[in-house]
Image (spheres, helix red, strand yellow):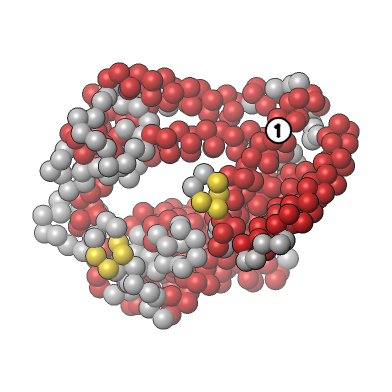
């Protein structure tokens, strides 16, 4: 690996040795100041000590910061440790890592990562969105006050993803780092699964379906993490977990791994079905096809995939309630009969058509990031989907950023 991609060397090591004791000293001073206070003082002292120790660990090993950042995004932190607004735990961790990148730039004065194709591409996409936003200030002006302006949040997400990519490129150096990060991602995802299984067995707590506008406790969800509480996202993450387990089963050839992998993958496939997510159902089919026709896998594993498909078919026909099965098969573009899940399908169809029309109206630069929702409500006020974003990332990006992104 060339010199441009090597980790922080001697200068960074010396900096870390100086900063760690200074950071701990600051934490001790903070503890002394806040310790006389009752209640909230103790909480701040505890948070300060944990934060100081964490910063020390990240300064020594940035991969720990990348993993912690993923963990706070996927699982969050309890109570006041999670923070609020922009002052959240994952944003603070991101600031620590961004500060380390800044230190590296000051010491080495080498912007080598800007020559990476991934960074160049994302930087060009961000630039196109900024140009689209500036132009939209003069063209797309709401006729009424907005219920909520999504522009600021969209820009924050865009630049935070660019910052994460820069951190990832700077600190993830070896295949071992990649394996560790993927394993951590799988571990964070699997942490949510026991809650899902418990809710399925006990029929779960009542969940409000934001699309159907009614209480629905027939779909598997988790009580942990925001994505676990959304059936569609839960199905998506389960499919990703199946692929990650398959990957680790190919890397680690131990028999115990092979024996554990197949039942866990089968359990995750069953959870996908119980979420009654049509996108998850289709993705599961693609996952099974991928596993079935992979080259170089053993006949035993291939037979196991066939058996898993058979088990999922039995769950579909014998275990799932009729309404759930009807919803999973509802892909028709004609929802006049209002079968199970018709409203959700109709919303997706209309937002897709409307996003295409918005894109056709301004195909080069789009309507500006964060402007689709209010413009959609303004153009189609009587639509069942008025004000909703399209359930298609490509169409959404094309409508708000034009052809370039």
Q: What element carries label 1?
A: helix
Residue at the extreme bottom of the image, as rendered: 202
Decide if residue 169 is in sight here: yes
Q: In this view, does 154 lie above or below 304?
A: above
Q: Left or right: 124 with respect to 351?
A: right
Q: Residues within 10 Å of mark 1 (few under 14, many from 20)?
A: some
Q: Is residue 193 above or below residue 397?
A: below
- Viewer-closest of 125 and 73: 73
Residue at the extreme front of the image, as rendered: 36
Residue at the extreme left of the image, as rendered: 336
Q: Using the rendered view, name the quadrant where residue 16 is placed.
A: top right
- Viewer-closest of 351 and 78: 78
Q: Indicate the position of residue 394 as horizontal and vertical percent values.
A: 38, 36
Please state, as top left, top right, bottom left or bottom right, where the N terminus lies in the image.
Answer: top right
Q: Is residue 45 above or below residue 13?
A: below
Q: Indicate the position of residue 114 as horizontal and vertical percent values.
A: 64, 23
Residue located 53% across and 28% down the image: 122
Please state, as top left, top right, bottom left or bottom right, where the C terminus lies in the image.
Answer: top left
Q: Indicate the position of residue 217 as horizontal and vertical percent values.
A: 32, 72
How many dots with numbers? Answer: 1
- Viewer-closest of 182 and 127: 127
Q: Left or right: 185 with respect to 346?
A: right
Residue located 48% across and 26% down the image: 125
Q: Indicate the position of residue 325 as horizontal and vertical percent values.
A: 28, 68
Decide if residue 352 is in sight here: no
Q: Which residue in the protein does label 1 denote?
A: 101
Q: Using the rendered view, name the quadrant where residue 14 is placed.
A: top right
Residue located 30% across and 62% down the image: 209
Q: Using the rendered view, name the quadrant where residue 381 is placed.
A: top left
Residue located 34% across and 37% down the image: 149
Q: In this view, does 322 lie above or below 24?
A: below
């Amino acid at each position: 690996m060339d010199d441009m991609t090597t980790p922080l060397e001697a200068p960074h090591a010396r900096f870390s040795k100086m900063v760690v004791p200074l950071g701990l000293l600051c934490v001790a001073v903070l503890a002394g100041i806040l310790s006389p206070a009752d209640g909230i003082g103790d909480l701040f002292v505890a948070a300060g000590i944990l934060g100081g120790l964490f910063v020390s660990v990240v300064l020594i090993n940035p991969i720990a910061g990348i993993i912690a950042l993923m963990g706070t995004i996927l699982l969050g932190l309890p109570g006041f440790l999670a923070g609020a607004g922009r002052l959240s735990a994952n944003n603070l961790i991101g600031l620590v890592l961004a500060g380390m990148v800044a230190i590296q730039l000051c010491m080495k004065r080498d912007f080598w990562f800007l020559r990476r194709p991934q960074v160049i591409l994302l930087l060009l996409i961000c630039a196109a969105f900024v140009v689209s936003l500036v132009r939209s200030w003069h063209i797309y002006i709401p006729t009424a006050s907005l219920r909520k302006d999504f522009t600021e949040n969209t820009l924050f997400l865009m630049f935070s993803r660019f910052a994460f990519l820069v951190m990832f490129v700077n600190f993830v150096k070896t295949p071992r780092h990649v394996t560790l990060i993927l394993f951590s991602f799988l571990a964070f995802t699997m942490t949510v699964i026991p809650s899902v299984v418990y809710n399925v067995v006990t029929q779960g707590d009542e969940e409000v379906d934001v699309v159907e506008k009614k209480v629905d406790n027939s779909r598997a969800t988790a009580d942990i993490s925001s994505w676990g509480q959304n059936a569609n996202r839960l199905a998506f993450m389960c499919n990703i977990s199946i692929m990650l387990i398959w990957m680790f089963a190919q890397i680690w050839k131990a028999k115990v791994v092979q024996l554990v992998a197949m039942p866990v993958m089968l359990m995750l496939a069953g959870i996908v079905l119980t979420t009654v997510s049509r996108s998850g159902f289709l993705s599961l089919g693609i996952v099974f096809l991928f596993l079935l026709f992979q080259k170089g896998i053993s006949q035993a594993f291939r037979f196991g995939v066939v058996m898993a498909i058979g088990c999922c078919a039995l769950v579909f026909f014998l275990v799932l309630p009729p309404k759930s099965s009807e919803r999973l098969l509802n892909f028709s573009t004609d929802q006049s009969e209002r079968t199970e899940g018709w409203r959700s399908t109709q919303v997706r169809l209309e937002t897709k058509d409307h996003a295409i029309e918005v894109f056709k109206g301004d195909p080069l630069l789009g309507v500006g990031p964060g402007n689709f929702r209010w413009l959609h409500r303004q153009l189609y006020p009587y639509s069942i989907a008025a004000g909703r974003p399209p359930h298609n990332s490509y169409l959404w990006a094309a409508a708000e950023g034009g052809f370039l992104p």
